[in-house]
Image: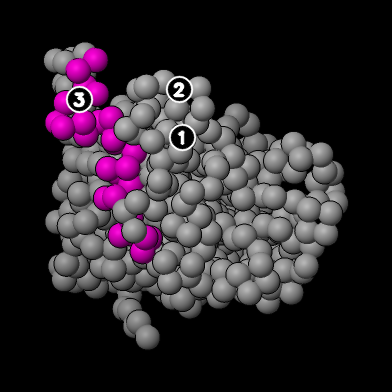
Amino acid sequence: MRTFELGADYAAKLDAVDPIASLRERFYVKEDELYMDGNSLGLCSRDAEAAILNILSVWKGQGIGIWTAEDGLYFLYPSYLGGLLAPLIGADKDEVTITNSTTINIHQAIATFYKPTKERYKILVDDLNFPTDRHAVDSQVMLKGYDPADAVKVVESPDGRLIDEEAVIAAMTDDVALCLMPSVLYRSAQLLNIEKLSRAARERGIIIGWDLCHSIGAIPHDLKKADADFAIWCNYKYLNAGPGAVGGLYINRRHFGMTPGLAGWHGNLKATQFELHHKHDPAPDADAWLTGTAPMLSMAGLEGNLKIVAEAGIDRIREKSLNLTAYLMFLIDARLTPYGYAVGNPREDAVRGGHVALEHSEAYRICQALKLKKVIPDYREPNVVRLAPVALYNTYAEVHRLVDILEEIGKDRLYEQIPAEKTGIVH
């Protein structure tokens, strides 16, 4: 059990013994700003910048020769980067590829694995997952000629914050063909038991996939042990690959040889790809699920930042993340509750992700007040300020400063100076 103390001096002591503190220097951190939004968009690192500049240099110098440069590295970039990322999710290198966006990868996976029959045609989801997952599921169901109101089975949260895992298992009935779940809930930071739910799905003959967007790079996963069927994720949050960076796709090797739901020429066997046959000849591994030409400039940032992640080690990243968020919760409890603040995420290490869901009845206006104080959080309906002190570049001293500012905003009711009406992009 973690124990903490109050005071800025104590935060400085924690930073002094942080084994990965030096990695902060590799990121473009503004010293006059508290960046607490790395669970939405991670900061740029010098390593990511160098990788992007390098690929620009290769393109400038070689033109179309980039395809064969460095022994074909960039032609094989999706599987190369997939191999670098695979240890973070406990997968074999050939089970991971870097391609498309999160949403398109959901479409790809469901188009591949959703094989409805008269008896088994439903897709099981929860009501708290990020909207794009549900949009894709509904779309795929309609493409098969079903009505989402009937074919999409929704497990409802008992409290609007958390998913009841036992309710999910109970909903895995004989009419369910596929299940799509989030590893970490984007609002409340609840971490689901991937192994437990994947095992339950397998025992019932249900294909199960995972959205790892809010956990990858912050939490180690073991998809091989869980034996999940597929997983998808973005790389621009805790993996800091850049805004709109290309997403990731995991395909359990027992599915190698399946026909991809969405075929494209880069999913073809490499040996025959440039023979340009009209009949698709899928690659023998996760690369079979590639579609079009890889957007290399949007992928290079990931290569750079994966080097930092490998240096830090995902286990040390997770340990510091748990410490940072536990310290933040300690300070919230000790100093902020008199002003209406509350922790809305699970507190146990085993069931929480990498951010703190700070709840307040005036969360939107508090979020805007924080920005005026040069704190970068984000807001999620209906009453959550998400705060993500990221292990690779945030410090305990920053967490302490953050609570100082939150206390000032709450004590002096500074949020009342902010219009209550939401305008523009609410973030």
Distance from the alpha carbon under mark 3 to that under mark 1: 22 Å
Describe residue 142's horizontal placement relative to residue 300 as left or right.
right
79 above or below 214? above
Q: Tell me if residue 143 is in the magenta stretch.
A: no
At 29% across and 63% down in the image, what residue appears?
314
What residue would you read off at disc 3? Answer: 68
What residue would you read off at disc 1? Answer: 281
Task: Kindly check if marks 3 and 2 are in contact, taking CB atoms under 8 A apart as contact.
Answer: no
Q: Amino acid at mark 3?
A: Thr
Kindly report which numbered mark, 3 or 2, lies closer to the viewer in this rendering: 2
Q: Over which residues does the magenta segment extend?
A: 64-91
> Where is residue 399, by image quadrant?
bottom left
> Where is residue 275, by image quadrant?
top left
Q: Amino acid at mark 2?
A: His
What residue would you read off at disc 2? Answer: 277
Label 3 element class: loop
At 75% across and 43% down in the image, what residue appears?
141
Closer to us: 407 or 261: 261
Task: Kindly check if marks 1 and 2 are in contact, taking CB atoms under 8 A apart as contact.
Answer: yes
Label 2 element class: loop
Q: Measuring from the top left, give residue 54's x and y in whole percent.
A: 17, 28
